[in-house]
Every structure is written in C-alpha cells, then in structure tokens.
C-alpha cells in the first residue's frame, strides 16, 4: 500500500488542480495549463543537435515547454522536431518560417507566440549546447526571486568560456566594454543569448520596432528593458563552444553590433522607433 499524501502535498495538489481548471477555461490557447515557462530555441541547420537539446530540456522535468522557431532549414531540422512532437505533443511546439531571416526576428516571432499564450517566463536558448539546459532552472529562480530579466552571464565572474579561440573571446569581451561605455548599462555580458524574461517585460517593449538580428539584437533587448527600468540580473554560467553543426556567426553580425549600438543609443536619445 502506498503512503497517503501529507496535508502539505494535498494542498499543493489542490492548488495545481484549481489553477489547471481555471486556466483551461480562460486560456484555451495554451495546451498545458500547468506550464508557465517557455524555452524558445531558434534553429537553422541544427539537425545534429536538435533532438538531443529538446530531450535535455524535457529531462530536467521542470515542466518547461519548448518552442522551436525554424527557418525552413534545408537539413530537415523541422521534420525532426515534427517527429519528436509525437512523443511530446503537449510540450513541444514548432513554428516554421519561409526562409532564413535571422535570429532576432525568430525570437520576436517566438515572443509574440509566447505572449499570446500567456507564458509567464520566456527563455532564449541556443540549440548548439553552448548554453547548458540545466542552467534554465537557475535563470528561472532568479526571475522568481527578484529579476525581471535574468541573463546567463559568461563574464560576471572572470571569463567562463570553454573552447572558444582567443579572437572570439577578445571580440565578445571587448564588445561588452564597448556596450557598457556607449549605453551606460552595468552589465558584464550584454551580448548574452541565454536569457529569461518575465512576460511583462516583453509586453512592455515595442517588439515590432526591434530590428537587429545578431548580437545587436541581444544588446537592444537588454537596453530597452533597462530603459523601461526593469530589473536586470546576471547569473554566472559556463558557455561552451558548439561541438556539432556550423556557427552562423558572420562579419555582417559583427558590423551590425558595432554600428548598431551607436544608432540604438541615438534613437533612444531622440526617443525614436519605439524607445
Ligand atoms: N531561426 C533561425 N535561427 C538561427 C538563425 N541564425 C542562427 N540561428 C540559431 O540561433 C542559435 C545561435 O546560433 P549560432 O550559430 O550558434 O550563433 P552564435 O551562437 O552566435 O555563434 P557561435 O558562437 O559561433 O556558435 C542556434 O540555435 C542557431 O541555429 C536564423 O537566421 N534563423
Ligand atoms: Mg552558438
């Protein structure tokens, strides 16, 4: 015979049941009323990583939902996701866009999708295991405590980057000083792409006016949250270079960040384009 649940467990179960019941009535868009957190993973040609990263998130058993925003990858990433959806029908979602249109717009697409479905905590994560899925819980905890935006930071305590060539570290570390100098944000890792946003942050930012695509997109999102006086908090993480698949990094992305940060600062001073 199994043990009877304690009073505390019974109250918890009743609470979940009530929330579930209410949410099923008032949020019919969301397939699993228990889930409050959505991990958005943009993908382009990630066939070698996609199954493993999805399984790694679900293996955490924290009730995270996952949305893949794929840009019609020629390698069949989306088909792989579709076949996994049979195994995780209530937790795994897929949006396929017509063509490769950049990481920034993929996230904006995912943010709108998440807001429509009333997720409370919305994460950004790469598919290539540079971000450890187990750190999702730490970002989540930071947002449950005090933060409005929790940033998985490579540079909060020293330099926590594994297997990157020196030039990449210098580029990224240098960029963080440059951004701090121009924007005045006191963040060690403003280009970080491992982030948890509270829904209210994304609802406040004018997502249609965010135009950047690569590193500049990550900087702009943080800067807009900072200007709206949201609490940004860094959580120290270890970042590891991808082992499988190809990087989508390009010189265009670097130049976008170099000039983008200045143009973004100017737009914010003149309160142009949604700032
Ligand atoms: N949907 C979509 N996803 C993209 C696009 N470009 C990159 N991604 C995804 O965004 C994530 C980060 O891309 P990476 O190629 O790892 O770029 P990065 O992390 O800036 O560069 P590396 O450090 O060199 O890996 C990965 O999951 C990519 O598949 C794009 O144009 N569209
Ligand atoms: Mg990467």
Image: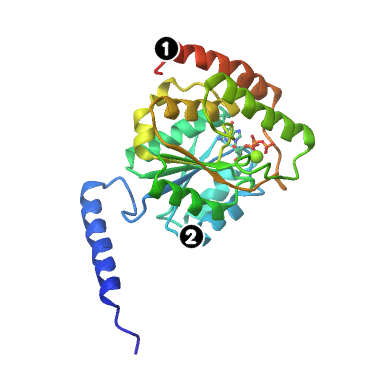
Say which residue label 2 marks: 87
Q: Please state which of residues 241 and 92 is positioned toward the viewer in this rendering.
A: 241
Q: Is residue 65 visible?
A: no
Between marks 2 and 1 in the image, the one whose residue lies nearer the viewer = 1
Residue 44, picture quadrant: top right
Q: Is residue 99 left or right of residue 226?
A: right
Q: Is residue 3 left or right of residue 269?
A: left
The residue depicted at 57 percent of the width and 18 percent of the height is: 260
Q: Is residue 31 left or right of residue 53?
A: left
Q: Please state which of residues 43 and 253 is positioned toward the viewer in this rendering.
A: 253
Query: Quadrant location of ligand 2?
Result: top right
The image shows residue 177 at horizontal and vertical percentages of: 63, 27
| Viewport quadrant of the N terminus | bottom left
Q: Crowdedness of circle 1 by 10 Å Cα count: few (<14), some, many (20+)? A: few
The Cα–Cα distance between marks 2 and 1, rounded to whole angstroms, is 46 Å
Q: Residue furthest top?
A: 270
Say which residue label 1 marks: 272
| Viewport quadrant of the C terminus | top left
How are the colours assigned in the image?
Answer: rainbow
Regarding mark 2 in the picture, which secondary structure is present there?
loop
Regarding mark 1 in the picture, which secondary structure is present there?
loop
The image shows residue 11 at horizontal and vertical percentages of: 24, 68
Earlier residue among tags 2 and 1: 2
The image shows residue 84 at horizontal and vertical percentages of: 52, 55
Q: Crowdedness of circle 2 by 10 Å Cα count: few (<14), some, many (20+)? A: few
Callout 2–callout 1 Cβ contact below 8 Å: no
């Amino acid at each position: 015979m199994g043990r009877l649940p304690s009073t505390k467990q019974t109250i918890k179960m009743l609470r979940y049941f009530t929330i579930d019941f209410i949410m099923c009535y008032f949020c019919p868009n969301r397939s699993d009323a228990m889930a409050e957190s959505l991990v958005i993973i943009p993908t382009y040609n990630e066939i070698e990583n996609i199954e493993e990263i999805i399984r790694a998130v679900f293996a955490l058993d924290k009730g995270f939902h996952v949305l893949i925003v794929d840009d019609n990858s020629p390698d069949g990433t989306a088909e792989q996701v579709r076949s996994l959806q049979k195994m995780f029908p209530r937790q795994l979602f897929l949006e396929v866009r017509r063509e490769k249109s950049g990481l920034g717009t993929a996230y904006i697409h995912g943010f709108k999708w998440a807001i429509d479905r009333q997720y409370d905590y919305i994460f950004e994560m790469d598919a290539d295991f540079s971000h450890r899925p187990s750190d999702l819980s730490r970002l989540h905890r930071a947002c449950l405590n005090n933060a409005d935006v929790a940033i998985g930071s490579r540079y909060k305590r020293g330099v926590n980057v594994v297997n990157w060539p020196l030039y990449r570290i210098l580029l990224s570390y240098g960029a963080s000083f440059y951004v701090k100098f121009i924007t005045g944000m006191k963040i060690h890792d403003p280009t970080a792409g491992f982030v948890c946003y509270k829904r209210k942050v994304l609802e406040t930012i004018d997502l249609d006016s965010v135009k950047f695509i690569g590193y500049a997109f990550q900087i702009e999102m943080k800067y807009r949250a900072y200007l709206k006086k949201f609490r940004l908090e860094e959580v120290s993480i270890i970042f590891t270079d991808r082992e499988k698949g190809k990087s989508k990094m390009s010189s265009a992305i670097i130049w976008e960040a170099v000039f983008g940060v200045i143009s973004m600062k100017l737009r914010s001073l003149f309160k142009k384009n949604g700032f």
